[in-house]
Image: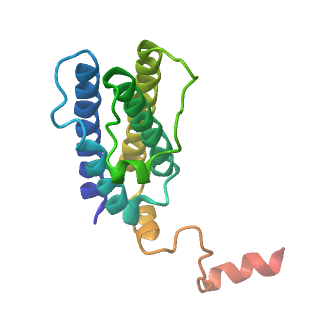
C-alpha cells in the first residue's frame, strides 16, 4: 500500500467513525439503532488491516484504547436505557474490560463520556492523517520495508577521508 492509499483509508475511517458516533447519539436520543451495532466490527477489521501498514505510528496505536472505551460506554448506556445488553459475543470478547464509569452514573454522564472518547478517536485519526500528509516518501518506504530507525551503512566518499584525517 502506498502513502496515498493509506491516507485515503484514514480519511474513510474518519468519515465512517463520524457517521457511527452520530448514529449512536441519535439512537441514545430515541431515533433508532439500525447499523449502530455493525460499526465496531467494521472498525476493528479496518484497524487490523491497517495495522500491517500503520503500526509504526503512535497515533495509530492510540486509536485502539480510545475506540474500545467509547465502545464500552455506548454499551453501558444501551444497557442502562434498554435493560438488556447490546453486546454480542464478539463485542464482549473485544470489550475494554467491563464498566468504565462511576457506579450509578446517569445516561447523560455516560453520553458525555462517550462523546469525549469519540472525540478522542477522531483526534487520533486527525493526527494520523496530518502525519501521513507531511511524512517524506523516503520515510514512508523505510517504515514499510522495516528499515526505519535502523542505522544505515554506507561507503565513504574519498572526499570524506580528508575531513576524517584532519580531525
Question: For the point 23% across and 37% down, which residue is it?
Answer: 15
Looking at the image, how many numbered discs can be counted on the residues?
Answer: 0
| Quadrant of the rendering where the C terminus is positioned | bottom right
Residue 157 image point, x, y percent: 60, 83
Q: Is residue 15 above or below residue 163?
A: above
Residue 99 image point, x, y percent: 52, 34
Could you tell me if residue 11 is visible in this image? Answer: no
Could you tell me if residue 56 is visible in this image? Answer: yes
Residue at the far front: name it: 83
Residue 110 appears left or right of 149: left
Residue 112 image point, x, y percent: 44, 18
Taking depth in this image into account, of 31 and 50 the one nearest to the observer is 31
Q: Is residue 35 above or below residue 78?
A: below
Question: For the point 49% across and 60% down, which residue is it?
Answer: 56
Residue 153 image point, x, y percent: 61, 82
Residue 2 appears left or right of 132: left
Residue 16 appears left or right of 136: left
Q: Is residue 5 above or below residue 167?
A: above
| Quadrant of the rendering where the N terminus is positioned | bottom left
Amino acid at each position: 500500500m502506498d502513502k496515498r492509499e493509506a491516507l485515503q483509508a484514514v480519511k474513510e475511517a474518519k468519515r465512517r467513525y463520524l457517521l457511527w458516533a452520530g448514529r449512536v447519539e441519535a439512537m441514545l436520543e430515541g431515533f433508532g439503532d439500525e447499523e449502530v451495532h455493525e460499526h465496531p466490527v467494521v472498525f476493528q477489521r479496518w484497524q487490523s488491516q491497517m495495522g500491517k501498514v500503520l503500526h509504526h505510528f503512535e497515533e495509530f496505536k492510540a486509536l485502539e484504547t480510545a475506540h474500545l472505551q467509547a465502545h464500552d460506554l455506548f454499551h453501558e448506556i444501551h444497557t442502562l436505557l434498554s435493560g438488556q445488553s447490546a453486546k454480542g459475543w464478539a463485542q464482549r470478547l473485544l470489550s475494554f474490560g467491563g464498566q468504565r464509569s462511576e457506579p450509578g452514573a446517569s445516561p447523560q454522564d455516560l453520553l458525555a463520556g462517550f462523546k469525549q472518547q469519540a472525540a478522542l478517536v477522531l483526534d487520533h485519526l486527525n493526527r494520523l492523517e496530518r502525519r501521513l500528509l507531511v511524512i517524506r516518501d523516503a520515510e514512508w518506504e523505510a517504515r514499510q520495508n522495516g528499515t526505519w530507525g535502523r542505522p544505515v551503512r554506507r561507503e565513504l566518499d574519498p572526499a570524506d577521508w580528508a575531513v576524517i584525517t584532519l580531525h
